[in-house]
Image (tube, coloured by chain):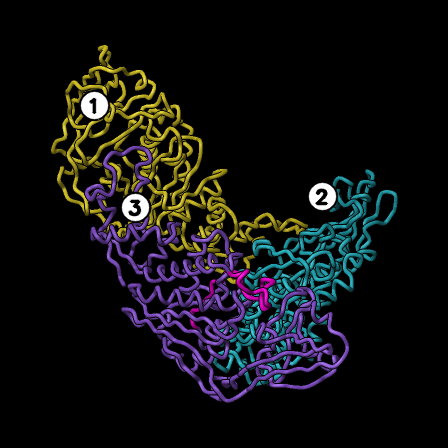
Chain colours: A cyan, B yellow, C purple
Amino acid sequence: MSLHEVPTGTKCFDWVVPKEWVIRDAYIKTPSGETIARFCENNLHVVNYSAPINRTISMKELQPHLHSLPHQPDAIPYVTCYYKESWGFCITDRLRKRLSEGTYQVYIDSELKSGSLSYGELYLPGKTIKEILISTYVCHPSLANNELSGPCVTAELAAWLQKYERQYSYRVIFIPETIGSIYYLSRHLKKMKKNTIAGYVVTCVGDERAWSYLPSRDGNTLSDRVARHVLQHAVSHYKEYPFTERGSDERQYCSPGVDLPIASIMRSKYDTYPEYHTSYDNLSFVTSRGLGESLFIYKKILEVIESNTRISYRVLCEPKMSDRGLRETTGKRGSANSGRVMMNLLAYADGNNTLLNIAEKIGEPVWNLYHSVKILEKYKLIKIKK
Amino acid sequence: MSLHEVPTGTKCFDWVVPKEWVIRDAYIKTPSGETIARFCENNLHVVNYSAPINRTISMKELQPHLHSLPHQPDAIPYVTCYYKESWGFCITDRLRKRLSEGTYQVYIDSELKSGSLSYGELYLPGKTIKEILISTYVCHPSLANNELSGPCVTAELAAWLQKYERQYSYRVIFIPETIGSIYYLSRHLKKMKKNTIAGYVVTCVGDERAWSYLPSRDGNTLSDRVARHVLQHAVSHYKEYPFTERGSDERQYCSPGVDLPIASIMRSKYDTYPEYHTSYDNLSFVTSRGLGESLFIYKKILEVIESNTRISYRVLCEPKMSDRGLRETTGKRGSANSGRVMMNLLAYADGNNTLLNIAEKIGEPVWNLYHSVKILEKYKLIKIKK
Amino acid sequence: MSLHEVPTGTKCFDWVVPKEWVIRDAYIKTPSGETIARFCENNLHVVNYSAPINRTISMKELQPHLHSLPHQPDAIPYVTCYYKESWGFCITDRLRKRLSEGTYQVYIDSELKSGSLSYGELYLPGKTIKEILISTYVCHPSLANNELSGPCVTAELAAWLQKYERQYSYRVIFIPETIGSIYYLSRHLKKMKKNTIAGYVVTCVGDERAWSYLPSRDGNTLSDRVARHVLQHAVSHYKEYPFTERGSDERQYCSPGVDLPIASIMRSKYDTYPEYHTSYDNLSFVTSRGLGESLFIYKKILEVIESNTRISYRVLCEPKMSDRGLRETTGKRGSANSGRVMMNLLAYADGNNTLLNIAEKIGEPVWNLYHSVKILEKYKLIKIKK
């Protein structure tokens, strides 16, 4: 994986790469001398992108700079103030309610300086330049499901892909959300538009509570069809959201003129679960089982895309299967059922249908056809158009 | 509005403009000398198009010429005898049951003479010659919902259109049903086929009991899509009838070879409510609220058509909304929701989608997008193709 | 009808016409000297295509060659051993359970010799070379619903077709299943692909228990649309199976590269009823009423195809029906209903819609339109494009 630095001030479409935020320490001292909201204890305590400050202020002045959640009194919220110089602290509502009148010292040792936006990129060449995009984001890794689960599953998936006998090429990117994908698109759009046949934003893939699916804007791309097929056949239940409830980098990938076929398979979708954007989105919510199942599903999806070739039957009428030992020679009631999947596969192998089309028409998961494809190819009964 | 007279005997397609019917007086004198079914009391008492008569006849001879409604004993039915010289009277069933044997004088002072068919036409030019047809009928205005409500709402709509900054031209016609639209089409078909993008037959728009929708024959024209969109979002419930239950001038406008995109939005549809074609279809059934709501819906429909331009987003990736004050700079859970309609509008503004397409895709009524369109145009983020 | 003999060894696509099986006698003699499984009593007792045998064997040796149905203890199953020299007997499970240890004589006086495959063919020319295929099979006529009902109904249908004023030509074939249709296609494919507009496999048409429908592979051919239309309007309930549950000669007719529009209307579908492929599939299950209703439905289907012409309305706007005595001259509430079917037919007679399209759009069975078509043609209001 190559790491890239993009300098502050770099223009990309309607945006400019912002200053880099450096944060070293932060806390509040209460009238009684207690130190609270200490950055070194939990980095959510400081509003992200807060400007430096070191002042003694009244409680009245402090209050507009405090963020807490009355309905989740023990959670610390995650708050940002991108693109406007400001400052603030995030604390539990229980603590906030205990604060008394008096003089408070607010201290943030931060810096907004000319620096760079960092991202990682891994390009895995396949047998064709047609490629699949795997995009995940790395801008607030203190939160577990949204977002650290994304880079974790993506890293495992990339390791697996490196060993996989790839037909397609893979573009795997680890970027900050929004500005990262906008910058990346501004530099690679032409090539990506030409080559990308499918892709996914990998985010919120760590819990076990739900399966969620956010389609591409088009709604019926290869990414969408494969995602729906795999979810239908491999998980017990999933919820499909409308594209209007998107919230991550598919906002850029699917924007007019960009028009990439990018969808997103998630467990509990951002903005739908109570732990979202609070200190509760932690390792009690995210589990190794949740992460493992997500990895399993993304692998299955990529396998389905890789196997999705057009298939032509090479003979007219049904082949004589019994000559090839592919059918029992004694005909009794029910004996036609053995080998039914194989015969159904042949019936739709008209050279126009891909393996996914065939699987959908005969109501089987694609992976139930892999074995039949191998046998039929061995007997030269079908031809695969890669 | 210009008034036109078409002489008796004028040929139009398969039809001929009939003689003009003049009716001055009519009544029946009973054996006891009572005068009933007096035209001057209620003009429904005479079968429309009755030939003149002045005879003394037995009750037996009279009966086949009487019309009443056994299940609505106090209602006078509305009956016609177009295209065949005949005569008759319409009375309440209660009165009919009271008639005794004896000699009756039947008197109709009418005339079927060479005259003319009258209609009104208002053409309101817009910025383009592409036009919208508003058609209503004026052949039996003694009945309130079907039909006087139609010309009333149409007149108000036309007055409003005169002041409206029209993109499209409008053809507003007040014609007798059937023969009027057939004559009108026979003289304007070529131009109307070339220019008409949408249109409606305005009838039965006066009561408060229901909302009804009769699609065009095609069923999916702009008229249909806009009508369904407005009804779905602006009224609590409506009933869509199949085209096979049509009954007014859309029979002509949608006939093969004419093929105009004409639908009809009604309140209680003709032939479905008990008061239809009786003396009960009066000002107890039709209300000013009913008429006003219909006018409101037709205005909304025309506004949606007028605003239904193709919209192109002019930037790649999402714009930086916060730079334009269109988004909060503090990011908390839920803060993406403000401005979501605007972002969804942009996501579909690919230059192919019209505003109606976009509204349908994002599940909003078109009118919820008008404000966003204005703001986005002001900031030069979108381009409108009129 | 012409009869054809195809010699053993003839190649056809992936297959070869097999040896002919001659069976003269067969039985088993039990240790106690009783003769059971006598071919002359029920020809199901011998596994079809059994090689000759005349041996004395132990019960242990006999058992693998016996077939019975534990869950239907009084039924004799129907078993075949095509394409592999073998032998066997089919008996009731009740009898099998009674067999004691000891020595059995098994006797089958059969022959597998160079012979021929026999089939019958009837070609009925119409006014056009466009043709309809009626295919039925004749390889195990000892079973009543599957299969003798098929040739019976087909024979009656063919007799009826001979007298029918045919627009289309008909190809009616009586073939052995699978190898018969494969051979037939191997010799007539080019012509059939060019001319066949519809067709059906007639099988399982004798019982009264159900109506079943198996679509073509395409699923939306003329055969499919007509079959669904007729079943929807003429029977109270029917079950549509997916093409993946096919089991007869449509397996060949619809295979890739053959691609004929062949569907199948059945009563109880093969492989779904308990009597299937047992001695219970007999004349208690098949009834003359069941056969008669199937014949009636197939006739209706062919009539619908024959009548399915494009229809053009020849006038603009509605015609003046009253001038032709096709509408009452007195207009009262409800009087528009008489003649509504005729007016609806005209409304869709745009020259693109066929009679079936029109019937589907106006929600009427096609046969309800036949009378209107005649009248409208007589009055020169429509033009029929054959």
Mark 3 belongs to which subunit? B
Residue found 68% across the figure and 82% down from its top: C105
Q: Which residues are magenta?
A: C260-286
Amino acid type, residue under disc 3 in the picture: Ser
Residue C269: within the magenta? yes
Residue A305 visible in image: no
Numbered label tally: 3
- Report the residue at 40% width, 27% height from top: B287
What is the C-alpha distance between the residues marked 1 and 3?
Answer: 55 Å
- The crowding category of the residue bearing disc 1, from other C-alpha atoms within 10 Å (few below 14, some 14 to 19, many at least 20), is few
The residue closer to the viewer here, C361 or C205, is C205
Q: Chain of mark 1?
A: B
| Inter-mark Cα distance, 2 to 1 | 94 Å
Which dot marks residue A64? 2
Q: Which residue is mark 3?
A: B169
Which numbered tag is attached to residue B61? Answer: 1
Mark 3 crowdedness (10 Å alpha carbons): few <14, some 14-19, many ≥20: many
Q: Position of residue B371 (x, y in %)?
A: 48, 45
Q: Nearer the viewer, mark 2 or mark 1?
A: 1
